[in-house]
Amino acid sequence: MSQSRLSTALGEGLLVLPQGTIAVMRPPVTYDVADLPREHLTIVHGFYPECAAWSGAGYPVTQDLRKVSVAIVVVPRAKALARAMVAAACAQADLIIIDGQKTDGVDSLFKACRKSLGDLPSITKGHGRIFWFAATDAFADWAAPPPAQGAHGYFTTPGVFSDGAVDAGSALLAEALPQKLPARMADLGAGWGYLAAPVLARTGVASLDLIEAEMVSVNCAKLNVSDPRVTFHWGDATQFTATTPYDGIVMNPPFHASRASDPGLGRAFIQAAARLLAPHGKLWMVANRHLPYEATVSECFRNVDIIGGNGAFKIFHATRPQR
C-alpha cells in the first residue's frame, strides 16, 4: 500500500513533530492520519458531511482552531480559503504543515511561502506536495476578513460558493419561480442565502428552511437573511430529516465534491428532495445543462417538466414525489 506524503515525511525522519496537540484543518475523511498520535489529534472542519464522518470515526471535531503545537493545513480548492487557513494556522500553532494536491493549488501556495520564507523542506508524491515551516507572522495579511458585503449587496467570505457574484444558475431559478409558492418551503444547499429573498417575496410562503453543509456559508446566510419565517440548518441536505414534510423545495445542487464533476451528488439531492416533500409537494431545481439528471428526476417524481433555462442551465419543475 502506497504511503501518504505525511506518512512518508514522518517515516523517513524528514519531519519531526513536537510534543503537544495536533490540529488537522479541513481534511477529507480519506486523509491519512494513521501516523499521528490519536490521543493528541483534533479535526478542524466546517463541512458537515466530513465533520460527521470524522466524528463517527471517533475523532474530536471542532469548527474553531485553537492553540496547538502543530497545525496541518489540508489545501482546499479555493485559493483565498487556503491562504486564510495558513494565516490562521500561523496564529495558533508552532509548526505549520501544508499538504495538498497539485490540482488544488499546493504548488502555487508553496511558491508563495518560499517567496517570503526562503527554501523550505518539501516532499512531492502522489500528484501533490507536503511542506512545513515554523510559525511566522509573514502571512498575517492572508487572514480571512469578516464576511463583507460585496457589490451584489450580499455578505460573503472566502470558502463559500460563488463568493464574488450571484451564481447565474440561482439567478435564473429565481426568475422562473411562480408568483405563488407553497406554504412550507425549504432550500437544499442554500449557500449564503441568495434564493431566500425571491422565495420569501412570493405569496403564500409561511416558512423557509435553509439547509447548508458549509458552516461559513450558514454564517453568511444569517447576515443576508433576517426574515423571521426563516430557520437555518447546518447539515447534510442529502441526509437531512424534517419533523414535517415540506410543501415545496428549491435548490441549485452542487455537483463537485472535488475538482471533478460528480453527478452523483446532484442525484442524491434529488432523491433527498423527493423524500422530504409531502405527497403534494413540488420541486423547483436548476442544474447545469450538461448534467444527466433527467432519469433521476423521473424516477423520483411522477410529473416532470423543464420550465426554463438557457445554453448553460436547465430548470426543472417536478411534482408528486415517489419514495
Image (cartoon, rainbow, N blue to C red):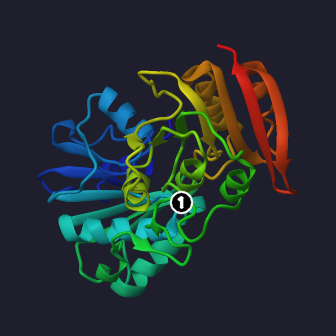
In the image: residue 12, left or right of residue 20: right
Q: Secondary structure at mark 1?
A: loop
In the image: residue 244, left or right of residue 275: left
In the image: residue 3, left or right of residue 278: left
Q: Looking at the image, which residue is at 84% across and 39% down?
A: 306
**Residue at mark 1:** 77
Of all residues, the one furthest to the top in this rendering is 323
Task: Tell which of 57 and 271 is nearer to you.
Answer: 271
Q: Looking at the image, which residue is at 35% across and 74% down?
A: 145
Residue 84 seen: yes
Above or below for 321 versus 225: above
The image quadrant of residue 16 is bottom left
Residue 94 seen: no
Of all residues, the one furthest to the front in this rendering is 203
Task: Tell which of 103 and 192 is nearer to you.
Answer: 192
Task: Tell which of 74 and 288 is nearer to you.
Answer: 288
Above or below for 235 versus 259: above
Q: Looking at the image, which residue is at 53% across and 30% down?
A: 238
Above or below for 170 versus 180: below
Task: Tell which of 212 and 249 is nearer to you.
Answer: 249
Above or below for 61 versus 87: above
Residue 163 position, x and y percent, is 53, 66
The C terminus appears in which quarter of the rendering?
top right
Residue 206 position, x and y percent, is 48, 38
